[in-house]
Image (tube, rainbow, N blue to C red):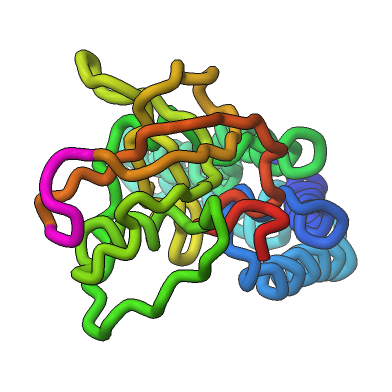
Amino acid sequence: MRRFVQVGLLVLAGLGLLHTSLFTDEYLRFVKEGMRPLLVASGLLLVALGVAEAWAAPPETEHAGHTGPGRTARADAGHRHRADGDTGHTGGGQELGDGHGQESGDGHGHGHDHSRVPRVAWLLFLPVLSLLFYAPPALGSYTASREPAKAVAVQEDAFDPLPATSPLPITLTDFTMRVQQDRSLALRGRAVVMTGFVSPAARGQDGWYLTRIVVSCCAADASSVKVLVQGVAAPKADTWVNVTGTWHGSGTLGTSSAAVSLTAHGVTKVAKPSNSYMDALPLGSG
């Protein structure tokens, strides 16, 4: 890969990061919101490195290995060695062979540029250009359907009283904790509303999952929170919806035996949030 291509790769990668993190919300498909300053700094650094590389390296240095004085001196030494072999030794043929071998060795060692990057390195331009023109979508039902639901933390202290709002806006994580750990049974008979995207249940299982994907740092460590929805037909996978319903699952409410499920009374399509990698309350619920 020639120097101007290396420079272009650095600059384009930097511009791609700056475009994604400064002018759009697409970076939220890959990392948490708090990582934005680091992305901006990385983009500026890559652009600076590309400019510095273009400014500092003279074009002729790329071919110094082919025409430099060191190569001329070695070539002259090879000719003198062959001449000595012809005039001063009885084993001239052998000396000629040695001189020729040395010259061939030098020619092979310096006649090819082994510092070049393999042609496959051109594929590095694909992810760089994608930052500028097409960002891959956020993780969705395909990922969620291939991993178990995230285990929620154990609530050590008593749960806070729930507001009297009906239906009660609640996150999928809080619903799961309340269903399996709240001994006060505050969710018994309460209508709740939650927001997430649709992901399919396992084959043969009744219902579908309302799902959220949560990240700790970036999409590589993503895990999913799921609530089984029953009583209504499943919308198309990856559709973002508000689901209103009540807990009528199996097991005993307030214990680990309680199924994290919801009997739905209504499903409404909603717009996908700009930051989909967090378990948030329904929009407009406060």
Q: Residue 281 at what x, y percent from top left?
A: 57, 58
Res. 62 in view = no
> Which residue is painted at 80% across and 69% down in the image?
44
Q: Quadrant of the N terminus?
A: top right
Does residue 248 lie above or below 177 as drawn?
above
Q: In x, y percent, where is residue 286?
A: 67, 66
Left or right? Give the position of 219 relative to 28. Answer: left
Q: Which residue is drawn at 21% across and 66% down?
A: 181
Q: Assess whether residue 254 is covered by the magenta stretch.
A: yes
* Residue 44 sits inside the magenta stretch: no
x and y percent of residue 43 in the render? 76, 64
Q: Position of residue 73 (x, y in %)?
A: 63, 59
Q: Is residue 109 left or right of residue 261?
A: right
The residue that appears at 26% across and 20% down in the rendered structure is 206
- The span picked out in magenta is 249-255
Instruction: Give me the residue at 55% from left, 36% from top.
Output: 118
> As rendered, which of 106 and 34 lies closer to the eye?
34
Residue nearer the viewer, 136 or 238: 238
From this view, report whether residue 47 is shown above or below residue 202.
below
